[in-house]
Image (cartoon, grey):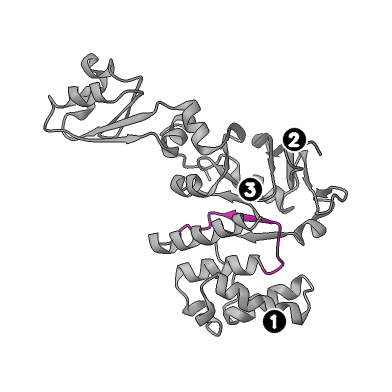
Amino acid sequence: MNPSSPPTPLFDVQLLRKHYGAATVVDDVSFQIRPGECLGVIGPNGAGKTTTIRMCLGLTAPDAGSIHYYPPGGGAALAMPRDALAIKQQLGVVTQFDTLDPDFTCAENLRVYGRYFGLPRATLDERIPQLLEFAALTHKAAAKPGELSGGMKRRLSLARALVNAPRLLLLDEPTTGLDPQARHLMWERLQRLVQSGTSILLTTHFMDEAERLCSRLLVLDHGRKIAEGAPRALIAEHLEREVVEVYGAGAVALATDPAFTALAARVEVSGETVFFYTHKAPPLLDALLTQPHLRTLHRPANLEDLFLKLTGRQIREDG
């Protein structure tokens, strides 16, 4: 292989399409996941994220397109759904809702799941303590899921997904419902997995999570891929460098005042807050000193700004 050429992808999705009746929910979506990479999929409700993941797992058949998994050692590519069983041997899955068996202890949940993959007893005897330690659950080995906190259950689900030593993890909203401490612990464990060479396909509604964990992002809207790239590169490509938020009684009037709009490249209003997007904030901040009754927040542009610019601020009610 040429040293300058990109590595062979672990997972390759090309021109994926899915219809439900007259509605096209996934429309020619393509992406690749490389070894040791975390690819995040973000988008509003109804963007096609869940359907895309279901097709990648072989749970929903695509109407068009291809899904290929490349096994280690340069073997022939496996195709989903034709080779679904062989591919799933190399996948780990953490769904948004826990599917732990309430009648088994933490250790037993891992052991039973390992048997589904035909893992020998000796392998499980060695691997289960390692996974419980990784999940910070060694002290809960004999506890049942009903005795665990929400964060502990999510970490046990992650440990269970790792029981077959997968090369690729598919995580659907892995930290939904967790408190900040539990989220940060989950993030630290996922970062350790990526550093060890595991690939991750992650869907999330948390922009700080996507920016922290993902080396690349795929932005979906109305079933189509509308952007792809590294988080900071996407922010630099689509946004102004700085944001000044202004809120308080009378703030909205500034959105149409030329004395202030002339100092920003773009202005948006959401509720009672005005967002001024600019490459040079000091002149705007100086002008806002004439409005001491208003509160301001000056910050760099972030992934949430990108998300809202690309997909809009209107709430989506569809799933």
Outermost bottom residue: 142
Tell whether label 2 touches label 3 (CB within 8 Å).
no
Mark 1 vs 2, N-terminal side: 2
Name the spot of residue 169 as percent of width and height, x first.
65, 56
In magenta stretch: residue 271: no
**Residue at mark 1 to residue at mark 2: CA–CA distance:** 41 Å
Q: Position of residue 90 (x, y in %)?
A: 75, 59
Q: Which residue is mark 2?
A: 5
User: What residue is shown at x 84% (from left), y 53% (from top)?
Assistant: 73
Q: Is residue 85 above or below residue 204?
A: below
| Residue at the spot 55% in from the left edge and 46% down from the top edge | 214
Q: Is residue 123 left or right of residue 273?
A: right
* Residue assigned mark 1: 125
Q: Quadrant of the N terminus?
A: top right
Q: Amino acid at mark 1?
A: Asp
Against 228, residue 114 (above or below) is: below
Is any atom of residue 104 visible in this view?
A: yes
Q: Secondary structure at mark 1?
A: helix
Q: 299 or 30: nearer the eye?
A: 299
Residue position marked by numbered label 3 in the rendering: 37
- Tell me where residue 60 appears, x and y as whole percent: 72, 50
The secondary element bearing badge 3 is classed as: loop
Q: Report, in whole angstroms, how far the alpha carbon at label 3 lies from the one at label 1.
A: 29 Å
Which quadrant of the figure has residue 158?
Answer: bottom right
The amino acid marked with disc number 2 is Ser
What range of the chain is rendered magenta? Answer: 163-176
Depth-wise, is mark 1 or mark 2 nearer the camera? 2
